[in-house]
Amino acid sequence: PLNFSKPLWEIHILQIKTSQANSVVILRIHHSIGDGVSLISLLLAFTRKSSDPDALPSLPVDNKKKSKALQTRGSGSLGFLGYFVLILAFLKMLWNTLVDVVLFTATIIFLKDTNTPLKGKPGIEKAPGKFCSIFSRTEATQNR
């Protein structure tokens, strides 16, 4: 059963300037409100770039074309060069996976978290503080 003493969503707007944004929004949304794809679509519908506020939000698009070595020939086979490229891609994926596992293990064992404006002092997890403001949708759109 749902715990109705806790809200199904929390929105925190932090006035922290980064290299890519004027502020940071932290959303905490219960999964019963929607799946990941629908929630990201909703988030994109409410956001705009600060560099071009009139532009519609969009996801980045990968415009890379298929490699000519991987294009099939008339008979449907990849050819020697195509198989060579596939083997190299597999070896690259294997190497990157191994490097990621080593870095993850080193991070867990040796490294500490970097200090950020969102990180609290040790022990904060036992006594979390909350900043909540309740406002209507019209108030939110008037403050744009």
Image (spheres, rainbow, N blue to C red):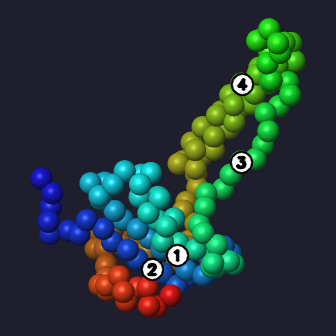
Q: Secondary structure at mark 3?
A: loop
Against 65, residue 24 (above or below) is: below
Q: Is residue 105 visible?
A: yes
Q: Secondary structure at mark 2?
A: strand
Mark 2 vs 3: CB contact within 8 A: no
Where is residue 28 shown, x and y percent of the image?
Answer: 36, 65
Q: Earlier in the sequence, mark 1 or mark 2?
A: 2
Q: Nearer the viewer, residue 105 or 15?
A: 15
Where is residue 109 shown, x and y percent of the image?
Answer: 54, 47
Q: Earlier in the sequence, mark 3 or mark 4?
A: 3
At x 86%, y 12%, the residue is: 80
Residue 104: assigned label: none
Mark 2 vs 4: CB contact within 8 A: no
- Residue 19, located in which quarter of the rendered image? bottom right
Which residue position holds label 4?
90
Where is residue 92 shown, x and y percent of the image?
Answer: 75, 30
Q: Nearer the viewer, residue 83 or 52?
A: 52
At x 44%, y 91%, the residue is: 142
Which residue position holds label 3?
62
Q: Amino acid at mark 1?
A: Val
Which residue position holds label 1?
24
